[in-house]
Amino acid sequence: MDDVRSKVSAEEWQVRVDLAAAYRLVADYGWDDLVFTHISARVPGPEHHFLINPYGWLFEEITASSLVKVDLDGRKVMDSPHEINPAGFTIHSAIHAARADAQCVMHTHSLNGVAVSAQRQGLLPISQQSTLVLASLAYHDYEGIALRDEEKPRLVADLGDKTFLMLRNHGLLTVGATPADAFLAMYVFEAACTIQVRALAGGGELVPVNPEILAGVQRAASAVTRGLGGRLAWPGLLRRLDRRDPSYKT
């Protein structure tokens, strides 16, 4: 573990710690899917290098030193005994290559997220959380397990400049300038989906947000999405992790 830290810059080590924390938090909130989803982050510097989880590790096991450093083609650029999931990096590499601002890409298969992704109407404007997501939301139709490079341009085109992407019949995806930003966006996205599933299950008539209010949020989309940044909430989340198990930092 100390050996990895000695081989990377202080800036890369900080990204590793934050990314490992994001994995642990996704597990804590119950959004993980055993070993089958991924969070990636770009390594600071001129090289197009990225960090992603070792395939086969549970999210609750991820540490800063266990993360695998790869290039845009998913090839390891630093010695590691671990492999990565090629299907997982297909989605992530496409977004990282197209969006310089997408320094972190988070993808989940949460039950509520997949449930809403399978509903034809998609995310409904029925909660404050949903208005924040709808201000910067895109959709991508399901094309099977993401293994084919030919899907990349369609996925990138569908995402455009948005922060939130609903992968139909598949799950949720967020992008951010940092792991903190991507996590906070996913927190709101997941909350909006959970509220929708519960509201529909209640069986009563739903009360949508006034279209004028929704339009106002959409007009201020850039300010709204910046407001989801992790500067305020992230330190508290790290303190929670430290109280429970600080091993993510190793």
Image: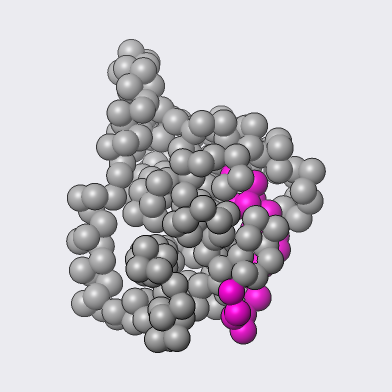
Which residue, as the protein is rendered here, is positioned at the far top? Answer: 212
Say which residue appears at 35% left-offset and 68% top-offset: 10
Instruction: Answer yes or no: is residue 106 visible.
Output: no
- Reply yes or no: does residue 94 show up in magenta: yes
Compared with 231, 69 (above or below) is below
Closer-to-camera residue (142/150): 150
Q: Give the magenta range.
A: 78-95
217 horizontally vs 231: left or right: right
Closer-to-camera residue (168/180): 180
Closer-to-camera residue (206/52): 52
Q: Quadrant of residue 189?
A: top left
Say which residue appears at 56% left-offset and 68% top-offset: 69
Q: Quadrant of the C terminus?
A: bottom left
Closer-to-camera residue (160/210): 160
Q: Position of residue 167 (x, y in %)?
A: 60, 43
Say which residue appears at 52% left-offset and 47% top-offset: 173
Q: Position of residue 224 (x, y in %)?
A: 31, 31
151 horizontally vs 182: left or right: right
Q: Quadrant of the N terminus?
A: bottom left
- Reply yes or no: does residue 127 show up in magenta: no
Which residue, as the protein is rendered here, is positioned at the far front? Answer: 46
